[in-house]
Image (cartoon, rainbow, N blue to C red):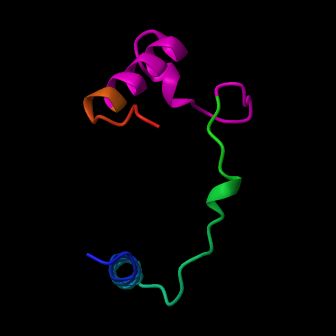
Amino acid sequence: MELTKWNECLYKEIAELEKLIQLLLHISELPTVDFYSIQDHHSMVDKDCYFGTELPGGKIGAREWMIAQLERNNETEL
């Protein structure tokens, strides 16, 4: 499969999902979201919850869980 066709396919899927969300939420336009400004870090005291604190072992348990998931999915190679 050509990379450009794959890219086009992804953009079409995203556009369809956005239309569906607009329909379900009864809105005409989706808000703009800057994903680069979103941070989830254990040292941010203004956040209500860091996902790692909910796992057994806290930050260390969360780190071990993430590494195990990457290994399970064969995603540890760079």
Q: Residue at x 37, y 75 (%)?
A: 3
Q: Looking at the picture, tell me which residue is in the foreground, 66 or 28.
A: 66
Instruction: Determine whether, in the image, residue 1 is placed left or right of residue 43.
Output: left
Q: Residue at x 67, y 56 (%)?
A: 36
Q: How many marks?
A: 0
Residue 43 lies in the magenta stretch: yes
Task: Please tell me in which quadrant of the rendered image residue 7 appears.
Answer: bottom left
Residue projecting furthest to the top: 57
User: Residue 19, how many percent across, how many down?
Assistant: 38, 85
Q: Residue 59 occupies which quadrant of the picture?
A: top right
Picture residue at 42% right of the left edge, 19% below the top: 55
Is 75 part of what is drawn in magenta? Answer: no
Taking the view exactly as shown, the residue that stands out farthest to the bottom is 28
- 20 up-or-down from 34: above or below: below
Q: Is residue 69 above or below residue 14?
A: above
Rendering coords of residue 74 (x, y %): 29, 34
**Residue located 67% across and 36% down the image:** 47
Rendering coords of residue 39 (x, y %): 66, 43
Where 2 sits versus 33, above or below? below
Segment tinted magenta in the rendering: 42-69
User: In the displayed structure, would residue 23 be above or below residue 78?
Assistant: below
Q: Quadrant of the N terminus?
A: bottom left
